[in-house]
Image (tube, rainbow, N blue to C red):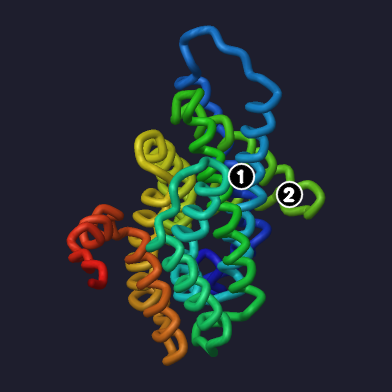
Amino acid sequence: MLYAATPTPRFDAVSLLVARGFWMLPLFLVLAAVTRPKQRWSLGGRDALLFLACGVAFGPGACALAALGASATSAAHFVLLVSLFPPLAGGLAALFLRERLAPVRVVAILVGVVGASTLALSKSTGGATPSGDLLVAAFIAAWALLTVGIRLLNRTYPPLFVVGVFGAVGSLLLALLGIPSGRMGAVLVPLQHFDTRTVLCFDVEIILLLSLVAQLLQGLALRTLNVALVAALTSYGSIFAGLAASFLVLGERLTTGDVVASAFLVTAVALSLLPESLFRRRALAQPSVPPDG
């Protein structure tokens, strides 16, 4: 909606990510200051690199790639591709965090890959392009890496402090992109436009809810839940809320190829959400086969 040409064009992808970084920065700095650990602590070289990596994954990674991808593909394709998040995050968690990857999760990864491939090859309404879909896929990869990094840092630091630090680093990196791109003037747009679209879409949705509140909730969730489950729940809500908004607000429609792809992708999310205990009980319930003779 912020990219729309009416009534006047205000944001392109680069100006949006620069403005987002600038206005997120003070919020995350305050959060980090308020939630810093009370006991004495020192930041080791490994943790410093991990905070920096999370900041890069959040700012130039997830936020920038999301803005670029949304400008080059349809909203429907964007939210459907979010379904790649659970299997990818679960696979990375198994690789780096030694979290167990159940067979059903492996199936979810394979089904998700098939769905994403089908979606990328389909001809969609709403301005979807293969390059835009690829940018969204890169955004999902950065988001998954960020999730794993948060889980690692949460083992040592308070979750809200973790969010404040990596959020501030990522926001600063985004805002600094305005210098070489000549887009620093974009940070003034929210001060120059107080119409409903700008206030709701930029100030409320992108800065307050998506940037701050969503990161807070994800950080708290990752304190107690494993990466795969957090990713699956996030993706499940994003797909259905995003598809509904793309139809009702933007007037987009799915083609036959999109519907086929969405069936694969939603199945992948469902498999990521199924409790592993369900399959263990079924395996135990299978009757044993007596030996011959």
**Residue 136: percent from the left, percent from the top?**
58, 66
Q: On the image, which quarter does residue 213 sit in?
A: top left
SS label for mark 2: helix
Q: Residue furthest right?
A: 180
Give the residue drawn at x 64%, y 34%.
50
Q: On the image, which quarter does residue 276 sit in?
A: bottom left
**Residue 257: percent from the left, percent from the top?**
46, 89
Using the image as rendered, state which of residue 185 and residue 74 is in the foreground: 74
Residue 284 visible in this rendered orientation of the protein? yes
Residue 106 vs 75, above or below: the answer is: above
Q: Which residue is mark 1?
A: 21
Q: Give the mark, 2 or 1, whose residue is nearer the N terminus.
A: 1
**Answer yes or no: do the residues labelled 2 and 1 have beta carbons within 8 Å?**
yes
Residue 210 vs 273, above or below: the answer is: above
Q: On the image, which quarter does residue 239 sit in?
A: bottom left
Using the image as rendered, state which of residue 270 and residue 65 is in the foreground: 270
Q: Which residue is mark 2?
A: 178
**Residue 210: percent from the left, percent from the top?**
45, 49
Residue 63 visible in this rendered orientation of the protein? no
Residue 234 vs 293, above or below: the answer is: above
User: Alpha carbon of mark 2 to alpha carbon of mark 1: how far?
Assistant: 10 Å
- Tell me the crowding category of disc 1: few under 14, some 14 to 19, or many 20 or more residues within 10 angstroms, Cα based: many
- Tell me the crowding category of disc 2: few under 14, some 14 to 19, or many 20 or more residues within 10 angstroms, Cα based: many
Q: Residue furthest top?
A: 40
SS label for mark 1: helix
Amino acid marked by disc 1: Gly
Left or right of residue 216, residue 24 in this image? right
Give the residue drawn at x 40%, y 81%.
251
Amino acid marked by disc 2: Gly
